[in-house]
Structure formats: structure tokens, C-alpha cells
Image (tube, helix red, strand yellow):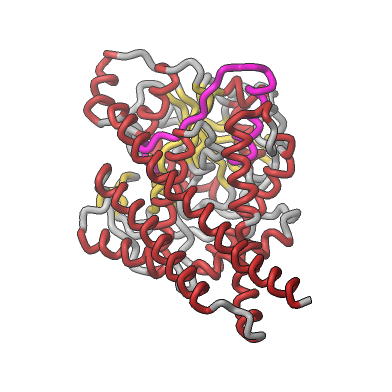
Amino acid sequence: MTFLLWLSVHFTQYTVFFYFLAVNSVYTLLIIFALRDIIRHAHLATSRAARRQLSGEFYYKPVSIIVPAHNEGTVIVQSVKALLNLHYPEFEVIVVNDGSTDDTLEKLRREFSLEPSKKPLRLQVPHERVLGRYKSAEHPGLFVIDKVNGGKADAINAGINASAYPIFCSIDADSLLEPDALLKSSKLFLEDDELIATGGIIRVLNGCTVRNGSVTDIKLPDTSLEALQVLEYTRAFLSGRTGWNALKSLMIISGAFGVFRKDMVVAVNGYRRTVGEDMDLIMRLHRHCREKNIPYKILFVPDPVCWTQAPFTLGALRRQRNRWHRGMIDALLTNREMILNPKYGAASFLGVSYFLFVELLGPLIELFGYISVPVLWYFGLLDTRFMVMLMLLAVLWGVSINISAVVLDTYNFRRYRRNSDILRLCLLGAGEFLGYRQIMLVERLRATLTFRRTHWGAQVRKVIR
């Protein structure tokens, strides 16, 4: 009995240790791969090159921009104005009013002089009933679809059916694209016939100054809650998705900003109605191309920038993270045949395995660690020296990963010009482990227990000035 107790105690401690070691090693490798990938893609995007292309030195594909909007009256006018000012030769903007109960449609009607339209709807992917179609009398490329509420995925499907062009861009209504972001993204579809989806970097709009639909002054948000999200986004996109890019295992193109080949999205029957529609679509595109032996690429590129509002209250942030985690679980279950399946190559063994063993099981193992430490201590079974060393290593390694992401971003892009902002981000890299991480852990655990719930939860917006 004594031996079994000794064995279980050591198994508990070393399980947590080796899991932690493996996960942080993955994060470190992703940063290394990200650095290499960013350097390789550096030549793809400069404003000067983009303007040379606009002068007639290149061919382009026209793009349909789809904006799903449900109760976005606070931000919709500013967002649409920003899209109409994009630097791109030929595009259309399709705003899909998804059964809003606020003044979203009325603001669009008043601001852009909407009038009835006969824009055709090709029934290629399913969606709820359309109530009305409108076009702007002042902006020939602006259209509005009014439909019965069906959720974000359903709204994008309606936009796909209304779109006229072979490439479409999906963007959230509370997001702002930089003027040349669409050009930098769509250019890749001309350079590589195998490309079927791409996304740019999502940056936090909170704290910035916006004038006439453009970000004119970039500043870190005042509150620590919002600034911590800047750190998270920096780490997730520059070290995370760029690293997965290099490993050909990218599983998410952010729902806030993605560009797709329409024929491929139609081939998988469009977006599926789920709270994790962005990850689910990418997984189904991987599956489709692998099963049909279609050469394909799904890429993240760090130079096109989309600015989006991050939650500015703890309640809104918890609802967002709960939804993200539920969406991930649903996508994994729906596409479970990709789990450890040689048919799907690196996308299965690297990308899907990461989300299964790190993102899904990680919160459970972390909780196991939090519970086992005080229990073992109470019974006098805790190897205190080992545990203190493990905790110090965990925090220091995690802080170094955070700071590396900030340094990588600053070195390559230097979006935050104020040294005080950069220093604050580095300090938050340490502060993240004191409370914030634990709150997010609890929310992910709650999501794991309630993953079958399909509601989005209330979204609160505010005007960014």
C-alpha cells in the first residue's frame, strides 16, 4: 500500500511536470518557427509595393467583402465607411443585417441612402430567409441584405450567395481594416493557385484613436484587462499562428478577418452554424482537400492588419472565451475523424493534436495540478522543493515566451511607438500569471462542461474615438 501511495504521488507530480515541459517546448518552438516565417514573408507587404500594384503593374481579382451584423448599431457606420475607403481597384461591400433588433438597419439606410435592389442571390449555401435587398445610391459597391436571424455563420452564407466575385473577405462589424490590408491578402491568391484561405493579424483597437474610419494613433489601452488582451493577441498571432503556418498545420483563420476562395467554401457547403464557425470551416477545408487529393494551402500572413474591439469588461471577456472554447470543442467533435489520422497529414498530427492535447486537455491538467498541490501538502506528501522549482520554472518560462512575442512584434512591426507601452506589455507578461490566467482557466473549464450550448451571449460595443 505504501509503495502504491508513493507511486501515485510521484506519478501526479511528474505528470504535471512533463506535461508542462512539453507544452512550453511547443510554444518555444512556435516562436522560433514564427521568426523564420516572418522573415520569409517580409517582402510580401509594404505600402510602397501595394501602391505600385495599384498603379497598374499587376493583375488583381475582384473581392466581395462580407460583413455579418447583428445589433451593431453602435459601430456599423464607422466600419462600413472604413471599408469603402480601402485601397483596392474593384470590390463590393455586402453588409448582412442578421435580424438585428436595434437600429443597425436604420442607420445604414439613413447614412448610405439605401434603396431597394435586385441583386441576385445564388442559392449555393444554406441560410435563413432574406427579407430585403438594398443598394446605396451614393456608393455603387455597397449592398445590404436584411434577413431573419440565424447567427454569424448563417449571415456569412447569405453574403456568399449574394457575392459576385470569386474571392470573398469576411470581417466582423466591429473591426477596421487598414487601407492596404485587403490588397496584401488578396495578392497572394494571384501568386499561388493552391491558396484557398488566408488571414491577417488581428490587433486590439481599444486605446487607439480612430478618425474617418482609420486608426490614426496607436496606443495601449489604459486598463490592464484590455492591455492583457493585446498581449494575448500578439502572442497568439505572431508566435502561434505564424508558427503553425510554417508547419503547414494552421487550424484557424480568425473570424474577424479572413479571405477565401469562394468555390472551395461552397464545395464544403459554406459555414456551419456553430459558435466556432471560423475553426470549423478551416478544418472542413483541410478535410475536403485531403480527401479529394486537391493541392492546397491555408496561410496566415502577418502584414495585413485588422483592428478589432476587445471586450472591455470582465463579464464580456469571460463570455467571449467561453464561446471560443465551446466552439473549439464542437469543431473537434464534428471533425473527429481528423484526430491522429494519417490521411490528413500534418494538419492531423500537429494542428488537431495540439488543440486536442493542449487546448482541450490543458485546462483539466492545470486544474488537476492546482488541486493536487494543496492536497499533497496537507497529507505531508508534497515534494516542496520540487514543486517550488516547477512553479518558478513555469512562471519564468511563460514570461519569457510572452516577452519574446512582444520583442518579435516590436522588432518586425513596431506598431506601439511609445516605449512606455512596450515596457508595460512586457510587465504584463509576468502579471498575466497572477489572477488573469486563473480566471480564464475557470471559464474554459465551464465551457468544457457546457460545450453543447450554442448561444453567443450578449455583445457590448462602444464607439472608438
Measured from the top left, where is residue 253 in percent x and y?
A: 52, 38
Answer left or right for 337 relative to 327. right
Q: Nearer the viewer, residue 231 or 384?
A: 384
Answer left or right for 47 relative to 196. left
Q: Is residue 295 magenta?
A: yes
Q: Is residue 191 above or below residue 13?
A: above
Q: Nearer the viewer, residue 111 or 284?
A: 284
Q: Is residue 75 magenta?
A: no
For the point 53% across and 19% down, which residue is it? 166
Q: Nearer the viewer, residue 97 or 291?
A: 291
Measured from the top left, where is residue 457 in percent x and y?
A: 64, 59
Q: Nearer the viewer, residue 8 or 81?
A: 8
Q: Quadrant of the N terminus?
A: bottom right
For the point 61% across and 36% down, which residue is it? 349
Q: Is residue 463 above or below residue 340?
A: below
For the point 35% across and 26% down, which residue is it? 88
For residue 150, say whether it is visible: no
For the point 27% across and 42% down, which residue is it? 412
Answer left or right for 173 relative to 304. right
Instruction: Give the extent of the magenta segment.
Output: 278-306
Count of numbered badges drawn on the protein? 0
Q: Quadrant of the C terminus?
A: bottom left
> What is the residue that sits farthest to the front in this orientation?
3
Measured from the top left, where is residue 186 in percent x and y?
A: 42, 25
Answer left or right for 47 relative to 182. left
For residue 88, say whether it is visible: yes
Measured from the top left, where is residue 109 in percent x and y?
A: 51, 42
